[in-house]
Image (cartoon, rainbow, N blue to C red):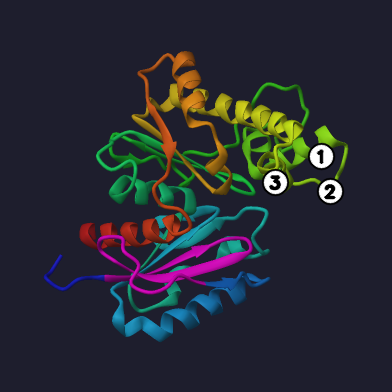
Amino acid sequence: MNGKSKKILAFDIGGTKIAHALVDENGRLLTERMKDNTPKTASEIFALLKDITARCEDDIDAVGIATAGEVDCDNSRIIGSVGNMPAGYRDTAFYKLSGKPVFVENDANAVMWAEYKAGAAKGCKNAMVIAIGTGLGLGVMVDGRLLKGKSGLGAEAHFGIARGKVRRCSCGNWDCYEVYASGTALGVDAQEAYHDKSKTSHDIIAGIQAGDKKAREVFDLWQDDVLTGIVGLANLFDPEVVLMFGGLTDYLDYERLEKEANSRIVTAPFKLCRARFEHNAALIGAALIALHNLEVK
């Protein structure tokens, strides 16, 4: 890199919101994190990003994008989307956004990269982030490299927990980790426990805060499902640290989960903690991945 400090326009594209900000080479936000509602069509998403990019194109060195779905990182294209994104999103060619370089990465990988470069996994060659939201995302570092696989989705939460075809996952399989350990899963647990289809994960958290013992029981059972996946993933990837990311992870019992997980794994003990970055993690990761790619290309 030359002496001039580089600036990246970073985007975090989600099913309901699109966030953006200018980020420097140290992962610091130079502008306020701005949010727009995610448009209902893929062409409108592209048009929104192109308009935002055009406003600051002269002041940036590259564009970094974190998005759900299967990403062709080499060609900055979406080649496989997820259920909460508009039809046609899978074919979006983000490389056409700007005359400046455009780099696209899966959002969970972006969060993992942010934590690896500047967050709670800094200094660790082997680490894992479990991002709990509406769904469940995974990002894994192995020997200092992001685990991507041939399609860019080398670590996904679509592996089974033996339950005997109880819950169908959006991927089409039965009883995936995601359908027991996501925010949506906690809502389903609440509906089953209270026999009330209107219950959500927010009701469980509110109940815990109000001292409702039943809400605590529901949450603790959900925590046990989260733990089951942590144990399996730790045995697979042998991490130094496992990071939990997302609003619900504020309420996890880290001391208990770490102790129980380490008592059940066959690999070396690991640390379990919250990710350092919160809402800005994917933005920071997208920017730092863009900067990394500028250096190596």
- Of residues 288 and 123, the one drawn nearer to the viewer in this rendering: 123
Q: Which of labels 3 and 2 is toward the front? A: 3
Q: On the rendered structure, is 226 left or right of 140?
A: right
Quarter placement of the C terminus: bottom left
Give the mark nearer the N terminus: 1 vs 3.
Answer: 1
Asked if the residue at tag 2 contacts the one at tag 3, i.e. Cβ–Cβ closer than 8 Å, the answer is no
Q: Is residue 200 left or right of residue 99?
A: right
Residue 191, disc? 1
Residue 36 figure quarter: bottom right
Q: Which residue is mark 3?
A: 206
Amino acid type at circle 3 is: Ala
Q: Which residue is mark 2?
A: 198
SS class, disc 1: helix
Upstream in the sequence, badge 1 or badge 2?
A: 1
Q: Is residue 174 visible?
A: no
User: Start and end of the magenta stretch?
Assistant: 7-34
Q: Secondary structure at mark 2?
A: loop
Question: Are the two marked residues, 1 and 2, in contact with CB atoms closer than 8 angstroms?
Answer: yes
